Amino acid sequence: MQFQGDDTGRAVVADLLRRHCSSFQLSAARMAGVGRPEELVYDVNLRRPEAGDVLVRELVDTAGVTGVSLLPQARVGES
């Protein structure tokens, strides 16, 4: 996701992740430049995998958040 906000916005994002995920961890962060949003990548384990679209919608509705994608994680040994 792309995030351009303050600590209040970060707290909202963290609250949404806590509500929808059994666990989550920030795995990458990159500053794109002055005045541009930072790119944040989280590894998440959804409480209800079928409700991932709800999490994405709620994140997009959060001030300062854009470009949200939820990608499935390939498991070792799966084809």
Image (spheres, helix red, strand yellow):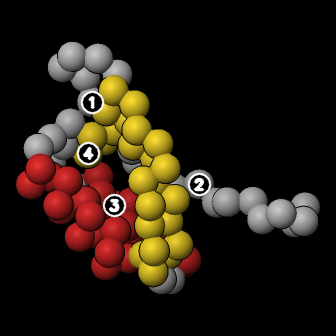
Q: Picture quarter containing residue 1?
A: top left
Q: Residue furthest top?
A: 34
On screen, residue 50 versus residue 55, left or right, reads right
Q: Which residue is mark 1?
A: 37
Distance CA(mark 4)–CA(mark 3):
11 Å
Q: Which residue is mark 2?
A: 71
Residue name at image x 17 percent, y 61 percent: 11
Amino acid on which the number 1 mark rests in the picture:
Pro
Q: Residues within 10 Å of mark 4 (few under 14, many from 20)?
A: many
Label 4, secondary structure: give it.
strand
Q: Of callouts 1 and 2, which one flags the residue occurring earlier in the amino acid sequence?
A: 1
Question: Of tags 1 and 2, which is closer to the observer?
Answer: 1
Q: Who is closer to the viewer here, 26 or 12?
A: 26
Label 2, secondary structure: give it.
loop
Distance CA(mark 1)–CA(mark 4):
9 Å
Query: Residue 62: x, y in percent?
Result: 19, 54
Residue name at image x 25 percent, y 22 percent: 36
Residue name at image x 40 percent, y 38 percent: 29
Amino acid on which the number 3 mark rests in the picture:
Arg
Disc sitting over residue 65 in the figure: 4
